[in-house]
Amino acid sequence: MKEIVLSGIRPTGNLHLGNYYGAVQNFIKLQDNYNCYFFIADYHSLTTHPHPDDLHGRVKQILVEYLAAGLDPEKATLYIQSDVPEVVELYLFLNMNAYIGELERVTTFKEKVRKQPDNVNAGLLTYPTLMAADILIHKSNYIPVGKDQEQNLEKARDFAERFNRIYGIDYFPVPQAFNFGNDLIKVPGLDGSGKMGKSEGEGNAIFLCEDDKSIRKKVMRAVTDSGPTEPNQTKPEAIQNLFNLMKIVSKPETVQFFDEAYNNMSIRYGDMKKQLAEDIIQMVTPFRERINELANNDEYIKKVARMGAEKAHESASKTIKEVREIIGFRSF
Ligand code: ADP
Ligand code: TRP
């Protein structure tokens, strides 16, 4: 039997090049070789109290964008978290053995307390328990997540082991981070600050749904400096970032051309950015077209969601039935 890989996607913002090269491309490879579950974490998103008018649209947009980017509902189980309420029951069970002290020590929680002192709700505190429930409900083996999620994953491991120990049964596999070896790439942003991300500020990220004009505008505004002052100089961070981005989207000879121009001090950043913008546009265009197509195909989206819900429900209800029995619930 194939091992189980699972990951959750927060329905916030649009898919950008960082998400695509850093996450989705890995998912696409994984879906060919593992029994994959990918879901949109809409329960999790309630910690920020989204308006009811926004929630569905955001979930649909993310589903459409991940489909357009290459997640295949025939290969992976692609579902919406709230279509599988068994997750909530497991969350409740796990919470009975999750301790306030350990949850309070989770870095992401401490950060939220600092950043949003007015909304420190119990959902935030128990975010790691819900995430553990997501993972354990399908008895997942591998979780492909970035560094920022390591501590949450650690909690999921603790809760799995604790459950097994309490009930004296080797029931839940202890989930591991999926190790990509050297395959993990970091996509730099356009503001010179290292990482492309949706919360890094206006103009830093390029989205897969973005139009040509806006891409050109953002790239032309990317942070540079006044140019090299001596041959073969080490590139400052912002310039290196621009080259790194170019390495990801452009042909090797294009990168080489501008690298040589940098080294012999003839580089014109305007030309480099123009080229970079065109190469990003070439990469993004087919995705944007597919996003627009899918967004108008409600029948298909509905079918995908239904299919995912069915498959996820099948696996989740089996787990919940067994867990109930292990805990000692019996029907009369
Ligand atoms: P954002 O930083 O835009 O909020 P998320 O935190 O939602 O992005 O990230 C979702 C996934 O995309 C994670 O697996 C994360 O590691 C990956 N990812 C996000 N930004 C980048 C980036 N600049 N380079 C590589 N991977 C990224
Ligand atoms: N917490 C993850 C994030 O912020 C999303 C997520 C929710 C998740 N449940 C998960 C990731 C289960 C992996 C496994 O990106």
Image (cartoon, rainbow, N blue to C red):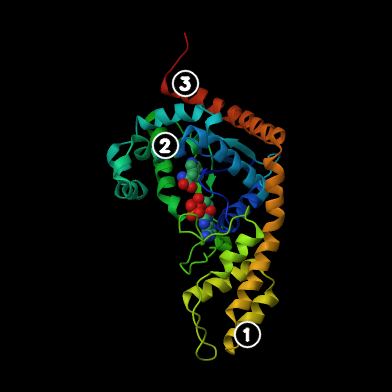
Q: Residue at x 71, y 51 (%)?
A: 289
Q: CA distance from mark 2 to mark 3?
A: 34 Å
Q: Which residue is mark 1?
A: 260
User: In this orientation, which residue lies closer to the viewer: 74 or 267?
Assistant: 267
Amino acid type indicated by mark 3: Glu
Q: Residue at x 52, y 66 (%)?
A: 190
How packed mark 1 is, by other alpha carbons closer than 10 Å (few <14, some 14-19, many 20 or more), is some
Query: Which quadrant would residue 311 be assigned to in this image?
Result: top right
Instruction: Identify the secondary structure beneath mark 2.
Output: loop
Amino acid type indicated by mark 1: Glu
Q: Position of residue 9 (x, y in %)?
A: 53, 44
Tag on residue 49? 2
Kindly give the residue lying farthest to the top in the view shown: 332
Residue 44 at least partly seen: yes
Q: Earlier in the sequence, mark 2 or mark 1?
A: 2
Quarter of the rendering occupied by the N terminus: top right
Q: CA distance from mark 2 to mark 1?
A: 51 Å
